[in-house]
Image: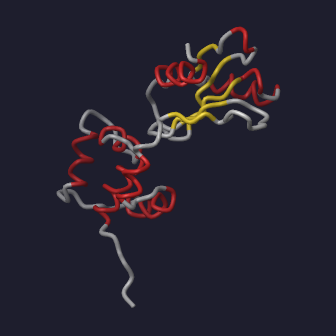
Amino acid sequence: MKENVIDPVDKLIAIRKATGASVEQFAHLVGFSGPNAADNYRQLERGKRPLVGPLVPLLDCLEPGVDIDTLRASVAHQMPAFVDLAPLGAEVDYEGVLHTRYPRFIGAFTGLMPDALRARVERAGYASVPAPADTELGQMVAIPLDPYDGDLTPLLREAARLKFGA
């Protein structure tokens, strides 16, 4: 029986779309850099540049971690960009917010972390915003789940606004 094999270029495009990353963001994510990074990446998607070197095995590693079924991926993009990690009525040891789109991150509160973890997070220098003073949650820090060189502070502010309604 013949296996259903996905063309590497189709796989590349599907994985990028499933992550919700723009061409510019995904180019950086897979290792392109410099002023022509997005253009060089676009050549891959158009089939004008061969998929060679570590990119092919990288796609095989990324594929199980994302849903490349276009119907399910399009439904996933209808889901909220932020998910509260402590839904009403749930007993959890922490509060937080998950940003579900690229760049994905967990917005966690330093005031609820064990001292050793809080110290590590503070040393890491993650983007942070203050939680409301009456919550005693300390800072909401963006713990990245994807490689990202940009500033997560604007997204973190949005997460805090949604979490606290401010």
Q: List the single residue furthest toward the right.
A: 115
Identity of the residue furthest to the front in this view? 89
Q: Nearer the viewer, residue 143 or 48?
A: 143
* Residue 163, x across and y down, in percent: 59, 23
Toward the top, the furthest residue is: 133
Residue shown at 54% from the left, 25% from the top: 159
From the top left corner, tell me how far across and down residue 73 is, in percent.
40, 53
Instruction: Please state, as top left, top right, bottom left or bottom right, where the N terminus lies in the image.
Output: bottom left
Q: Is residue 30 left or right of residue 155?
A: left
The quarter of the picture where the C terminus appears is: top right
Residue at 78% of width from left, 37% of height from top?
A: 91
Q: Is residue 161 above or below residue 73?
A: above
Q: Residue at x 72, y 23 (%)?
A: 110
Depth check: 2 or 42 in front?
2
49 and 106: which is toward the camera: 106
Task: Tell me the quarter of the picture where residue 127 sits.
Answer: top right
Q: Give whichever of 132, 8 is nearer the camera.
A: 132
Total numbered badges shown on the rendered structure = 0
The image's colour scheme reads secondary structure
Q: Is residue 50 above or below residue 78?
A: below
The percent coordinates of residue 144 (x first, y second) are: 56, 35
| Residue at the bottom extreme of this rendering | 1
Could you tell whether 108 is left or right of 6 in the image?
A: right
**x, y percent for residue 123:** 68, 24
User: Is residue 133 shown above or below 53?
Assistant: above
- Residue at position x 82%, y 29% in the image: 114
